[in-house]
Amino acid sequence: ARLANQIAAGEVVERPASVVKELVENSIDAGATRIQIDIERGGHKLIRIRDNGAGIVKDELTLALSRHATSKLKTLDDLECISSLGFRGEALASISSVSRLTLSSKPADQETAWQAFAEGRDMTVQIQPTAHPDGTTIEVKDLFFNTPARRKFLRTEKTEFSHIDELIKRIALSRFDLALTLTHNQKVIRQFRARPDPYSVERVAQVAGKVFAQQASFVESGHDGLKLYGWVLPVGCSNQTQYTYVNGRMMRDKLILHAIRQAFEETAGAVDTPGFVIYLELDPTQVDVNVHPAKHEVRFHQARLIHDFIVQAVKQVVLSERPELPL
Ligand code: ADP
Ligand code: MG
């Protein structure tokens, strides 16, 4: 079982940041409103995610650590409109096969907390009582300790941490209502307070910097079930603020990037490093998000329409903010 899980891990667990991604997405799926992420030595030594979500009942702890055990995907149709972030049911099993993972959890209506971890070649799950508040903590120690080939691919502590930091920034911009704390070697690196307003420019400033937040223009446009909003800064700026979301999921989709670039080119002229934080919302049946879970690409059923909608929306705001530009 461990070997099979390690093979699966090859696909899901590329580096510490991919572990953090899977675990934070699980916390979000569990309805957490506060997530604390503690990292030591770039994640080589420790990745610990604590949340205040629904928790896992004692009887399901073993299942949570087993491969293809997901509580989320009920029918094939669900693949069409996935609302939860994780759906493959193998993240925990995979991570646990290449690290020392412990899972501690307490649903609010369960008396005591329980801790689970998998051991040995057959990944037998052990369970013991523990102390834990409502919610879940997953601790991943010594990532890739038993897979030297993968360990070799780990970069420096600093590089691995910068991948994690970037991921947390992307997540912070995907859910303004989440409180997030990120520490590295016991030092607080980022702290996002929960924002009641979905358009919090304060959080944008925390992620993208004050200059971006002050200078970027707010875009908002919608018709025919399509909605786009966010911030764009068409002048070349040295900071690489380029975030795009489709139905709340972070994406780096070629079509979206192309449309934004085209809008800038047709108004402000070619810009080296345009900045943007853009949210696109549309009917989930009009888009396939599971093309490849790690690539952040989507497939729009009406690609042309979406492309033109984005171009128009971004052009409008660039033109209105910079009236001196020739039409
Ligand atoms: P998936 O997320 O694809 O279902 P995972 O391996 O990531 O698969 O997680 C397995 C299961 O463990 C989830 O379906 C969920 O029921 C449970 N789980 C994992 N993390 C948490 C968490 N932080 N809070 C509550 N339940 C969790
Ligand atoms: Mg998951």
Image (cartoon, rainbow, N blue to C red):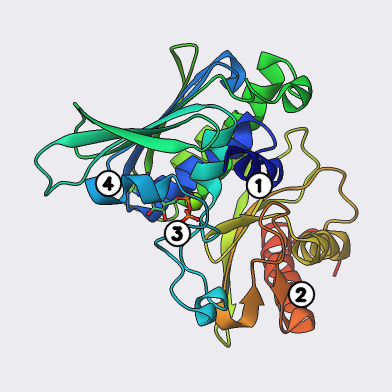
- Reply above or below: 300 against 33: below
Residue at x-position 52% and y-position 57%: 68
- Say which residue appears at 67% left-offset and 24% top-offset: 160
- Is disc 3 placed on a helix, strand or loop? loop
**How many neighbours does mark 2 have within 10 angstroms: few (below 14), some (14-19), or many (20 or more)?**
some
Front residue of 315 and 104: 104
Which is closer to the viewer, label 1 or label 4? 1
Instruction: Give the quarter of the image for residue 298.
Output: bottom right
Q: Which residue is mark 1?
A: 8
Place of residue 273 in the rendered image (x, y in percent of width and height, measured from the top left): 81, 43
Q: x%, y% of residue 309?
A: 70, 77
Q: CA distance from mark 2 to mark 1?
A: 35 Å
Task: Write down the residue under mark 2.
Answer: 307
- Horizontally, is 19 left or right of 202 in the view? right
Q: Residue at x 63, y 43 (%)?
A: 215
Q: Is residue 277 above or below residue 327?
A: above
Farthest residue, direction front: 122
Q: In the image, what residue type sits under mark 4? A: Gly
